[in-house]
């Protein structure tokens, strides 16, 4: 098997690449990533010398390059993670999200279709998506695989659009695909623009913790390595043409999560209780902010036998420890362009 993993230098992608390279020495793993601000080869330093691992620096929106790469390597499978992934950035620059998430996905679908014509036997296009395509829940209920798409941000609209194109290629050209829609991930190597690593970094630097609105927004959190294991299972055992929801069965209101994070940080940094909590600052809300996401992951549990293994308290503790032990990683990714981004977003 020659598996093309896109976005493998990013947060989730790096965990997926590591899992596949180490677990399946007989597969050739190609990690294709153009290394945006969110892509970082430091995330994969330990794999550089593996015989079954190749890094390709390329942009999925570059049709010529992508077509040439497919012609050269004849990738048998794709696990497609490359995307612009941050909702706040999609609000300031929506077109970038259409280019990468919609056009980039289309270019990959076309290249895959052209390479294999109608000879799709044993091949697979696995599209990694998000629960945000379903829009927002009220106080109750869960997203299932049959919930209607109702995206509210440019990010989620671009992901919804890419999901539709994948499905359309399945219906129109019999392209063998699966899609998984996952809830909020957290863990090692997440770029500090997302809630948990941003707040860890700010506590380390005694900077305020900008909670949007009243903080009563709810997300369903999943440890990234549990997501990678779900991807492994869905890739190998999922049925073509199916969608699977992946979630943590783990809902937290933002403000409660932030308080737990503050408490764990105080303990680990040997600070008096409630030191970090004092940094909490309520700021202007995110436009179009979805109230609540929560996944019903019964289908993947019943059909493929997947369940999250790591509890939230445990996963959060492992995550904080990783950031404390890897301050150099944090310093590297928060220098330069990050400072401009932070100024624009928060100050
Ligand atoms: P990330 O932003 O950390 O990483 C994205 C990676 O894609 C980076 O390495 C970046 O360099 C690469 N990339 C971006 N544009 C590219 C392009 N044009 N060509 C090639 N590479 C490009 O994202 P993440 O949080 O790891 O998310 C990965 C995937 O999982 C995305 O598709 C996202 O929508 C989905 N997802 C994320 C979450 C989450 O909580 N983070 C949850 C559900 C689904
Ligand atoms: O649900 C899956 C999605 O989760 C993924 O598809 C996205 O790629 C990923 O970014 C994430 O989206 P969110 O918008 O939910 O994640 P984020 O970490 O940006 O925000 C989590 C919650 O915290 C959300 O309600 C907004 C809030 N928040 C976020 C930031 C960055 C704040 O209150 N303050 C902040 O500074």
Image (spheres, rainbow, N blue to C red):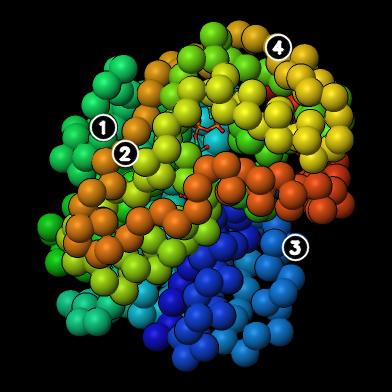
- Give the residue at mark 1: 142
Task: Report the residue at 36% width, 74% height from top.
Answer: 77
- Dot 4 falls on a residue whose secondary structure is strand
CA–CA distance between discs 2 and 1? Answer: 5 Å
Task: Report the residue at 32% width, 27% height from top.
Answer: 135
Is 249 or 159 nearer to us in this picture? 249
CA–CA distance between discs 4 and 3? Answer: 32 Å
State yes or no: discs 2 and 4 in contact (Cβ < 8 Å): no
Q: Can you tell which mark lies on residue 295?
A: 2
Choose mark 4 or mark 3, whichever is in front.
4
CA–CA distance between discs 2 and 4? Answer: 29 Å
Residue 29 visible to an observer of this rendering? no
CA–CA distance between discs 1 and 4? Answer: 30 Å
- Dot 3 falls on a residue whose secondary structure is helix
Is 322 or 66 nearer to us in this picture? 322
CA–CA distance between discs 3 and 2? Answer: 32 Å
Relative to 28, residue 212 above or below:
above
Task: Report the residue at 24% width, 82% height from top.
Answer: 122
Choose mark 1 or mark 3, whichever is in front.
1
State yes or no: discs 2 and 1 in contact (Cβ < 8 Å): yes
Relative to 243, residue 258 above or below:
above
Relative to 117, residue 14 above or below:
above
- Give the residue at mark 4: 281
Residue 47 horizontal/vertical position (percent): 67, 77
Mark earlier in primary sequence (2, 1): 1
């Amino acid at each position: 098997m020659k598996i093309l993993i896109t976005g493998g230098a990013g947060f989730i992608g790096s965990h997926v690449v590591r899992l596949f390279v180490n677990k399946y020495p007989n597969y050739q793993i190609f990690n294709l990533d153009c290394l945006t601000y969110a892509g970082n080869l430091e995330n994969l330093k330990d794999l550089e010398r593996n015989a079954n691992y190749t890094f390709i620096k390329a942009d999925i929106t570059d049709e010529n390059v992508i077509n040439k790469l497919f012609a050269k390597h004849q990738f048998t499978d794709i696990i497609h993670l490359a995307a612009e992934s941050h909702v706040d950035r999609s609000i300031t620059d929506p077109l970038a999200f259409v280019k990468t998430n919609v056009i980039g996905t289309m270019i990959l679908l076309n290249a895959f279709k052209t390479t294999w014509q109608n000879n799709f036997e044993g091949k697979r296009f696995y599209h990694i998506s998000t629960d945000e395509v379903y829009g927002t829940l009220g106080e109750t209920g869960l997203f299932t695989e049959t919930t209607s798409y109702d995206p509210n941000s440019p990010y989620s609209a671009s992901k919804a659009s890419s999901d539709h194109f994948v499905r359309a290629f399945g219906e129109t050209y019999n392209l063998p695909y699966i899609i998984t829609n996952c809830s909020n991930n957290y863990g090692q190597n997440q770029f500090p623009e997302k809630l948990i690593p941003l707040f860890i970094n700010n506590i380390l630097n005694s900077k305020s913790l900008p909670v949007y609105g009243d903080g009563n927004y709810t997300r369903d959190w999943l440890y990234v390595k549990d997501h990678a294991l779900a991807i492994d299972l869905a890739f190998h055992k999922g049925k073509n043409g199916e969608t699977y929801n992946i979630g943590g069965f783990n809902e937290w209101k933002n403000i409660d999560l932030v308080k737990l994070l503050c408490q764990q940080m105080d303990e680990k940094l040997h600070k008096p209780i409630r030191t970090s909590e004092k940094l909490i600052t309520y700021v202007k809300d995110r436009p179009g902010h979805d109230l609540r996401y929560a996944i019903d992951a019964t289908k993947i549990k019943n059909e493929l036998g997947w369940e999250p293994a790591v509890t939230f308290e445990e996963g959060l503790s492992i995550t904080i420890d990783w950031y404390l032990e890897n301050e150099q990683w944090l310093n590297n990714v928060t220098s330069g362009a990050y400072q401009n981004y932070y100024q624009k977003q928060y100050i």
